[in-house]
Amino acid sequence: MAFGAGRLTFGGEHLNKYVRFSIATRAELLSENSGSKGLITANGGHLYNRVHAIYSSEGPAQDFQHKNVQDTIDLLPARECIAGHTGKVTIESYTVMYDQGAAAVGYFACRTPDSTRIWARTFDNGLMQSMGEEEFCGCSAMLSDTEISAQ
C-alpha cells in the first residue's frame, strides 16, 4: 500500500475538506500504480466520528458483502463506561480541539479507581496549553462529574 497525506489544509477550512484532498491524492496515486490499494482515514472533528475506506486501482473481485460481527465483538473484553464521577482518576489518553487556531476544549479518557472508564473535558486554557507541551497519559487528575483538573 502506498501512503499519501494529500495536501491537508486546516486554516479556516471545514473538517471534511482535507478528506477530499486525501481522496484526490489517493486517486492520482492509484492511477499511477496499477494493481495498488490505499487506505484513507478521517474523523468528523469528534472522538466518536471515525471513518475509513480502502481504495483500489482495480474493481472488486466480488460485490460488497455485509456481515454483522456484533456477536464476535461482544465476546471481547470490555470496560464499563460511566456517565459521571467525582474524585481521583488516571488519564489514559487525551486530545485538544482547536477553533480558529485557539484551544477550545480538551478531552480525556480516564480510568476511575474501580477501573471503570469515564470521558472528561476541560475548558481551562492553561491546562489545554500544558496538554500540548507535556505528557498526561498515566497522570492523576481530579474529576468533578465530567470536568477535569490536573493534580
Image (cartoon, grey):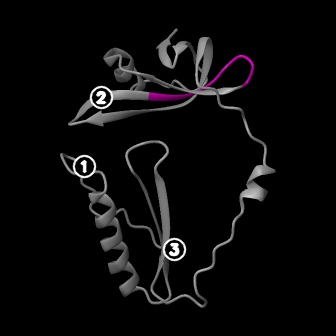
Q: Badge 3 local density, few (<14 within 10 Å), some, or many (20+)? A: few
- Three-letter residue code for mark 3: Met
Residue 123 on the magenta segment: no
Taking the spot 34% from the left edge, 66% from the top edge, the residue there is 22
Taking the view exactly as shown, the residue that stands out farthest to the left is: 12
- Residue at 45% across, 24% down: 121
Total marks drawn?
3
Residue under circle 3? 1
Q: CA distance from mark 3 to mark 1?
A: 26 Å
Snapshot quadrant of residue 118: top right
Residue kind at label 2, given as amino acid type: Ala
Q: Which residue is mark 2?
A: 103
Q: Secondary structure at mark 2?
A: strand
Identify the residue position indicated by label 1 in the image: 10
Give the structural element (helix, strand or loop) at label 3. Answer: loop
Q: Position of residue 19 (x, y in %)?
A: 34, 61
